[in-house]
Image (cartoon, rainbow, N blue to C red):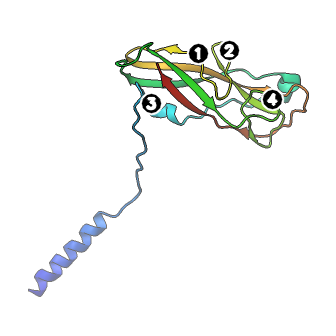
């Protein structure tokens, strides 16, 4: 009897050791009523604008534009009237560059400008509607660093954040 209880105790102890946690997996997401799902890589993304030479930004100069993509999947156009989507970007504005997204960090005299096609995006204002089709779609925008017209450009690291909202028509 003692041997049987000891065996059961050892077996139970080894089972709990075999099930010890080595890490965690966190699942995040949301459910919304929009016509399309947003691919996970587009929900929270990082756009690298590069290491930009100070002289390129002086007197209102700008860096090379980089693509900003929002990838949509599983679009269902049922209930839409125009089969279009607009995007509204919001962010803290730059104090150095009018109309630009403000930056934080050591760099100064700069802001991040966004474009839709060749047109600048105005923060808080919906973009021109883009046609979408059933299935997958990619919304393309641009972003670049803009230097202040008259303020000095201060070298250093920077970052900026913008949020986007999609509205389907």
Q: Say whether residue 5 is left or right of residue 128.
A: left
Q: Say whether residue 169 is left or right of residue 147.
A: left
Give the Cα separation between the discs numbered 3 and 1.
22 Å
Say which element carries label 2: strand
Q: Which residue is mark 4?
A: 97
From the top left corner, tell me how far across and down residue 91 is, in percent.
Answer: 66, 35
Q: Which residue is mark 2?
A: 119
Which residue occupies the foreground of this view, 118 or 49? 118
Say which element carries label 3: loop
Quick check: marks 2 and 1 in contact, CB under 8 Å?
yes
Quick check: marks 3 and 2 in contact, CB under 8 Å?
no
From the top left corner, tell me how far across and down residue 167 is, in percent.
Answer: 50, 25
Query: Could you tell me which residue is drawn at 73 percent across and 34 percent down?
Result: 93
Q: Which residue is mark 3?
A: 39
Question: Is tag 3's residue or tag 1's residue first in the polypeptide sequence?
Answer: 3
Place residue 5 in its image quadrant.
bottom left
Q: Which residue is mark 1?
A: 128
Which is more foreground, mark 3 or mark 1? 1
From the top left corner, tell me how far across and down residue 106 is, in percent.
Answer: 80, 43
Which is more foreground, mark 3 or mark 2? 2
Give the Cα separation between the discs numbered 3 and 2.
25 Å
Give the Cα separation between the discs numbered 4 and 3.
32 Å
């Amino acid at each position: 009897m003692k041997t049987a209880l000891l065996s059961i105790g050892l077996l139970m102890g080894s089972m709990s050791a075999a099930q010890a946690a080595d890490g965690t997996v966190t699942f995040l997401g949301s459910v919304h009523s929009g016509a399309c799902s947003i691919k996970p890589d587009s929900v929270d993304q990082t756009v690298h604008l590069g290491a930009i030479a100070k002289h390129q930004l002086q007197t209102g100069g700008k860096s090379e534009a980089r693509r900003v993509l929002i990838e949509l999947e599983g679009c269902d156009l049922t209930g839409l009237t125009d089969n279009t989507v607009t995007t509204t970007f919001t962010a803290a504005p730059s104090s150095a560059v009018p109309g630009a997204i403000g930056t934080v960090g050591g760099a100064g005299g700069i802001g991040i400008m966004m474009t839709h096609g060749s047109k600048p995006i105005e923060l808080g204002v919906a973009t021109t509607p883009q046609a979408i089709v059933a299935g997958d779609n990619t919304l393309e925008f641009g972003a670049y660093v803009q230097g202040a017209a008259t303020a000095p450009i201060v070298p250093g690291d920077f970052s900026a954040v913008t949020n986007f909202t999609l509205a389907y028509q």
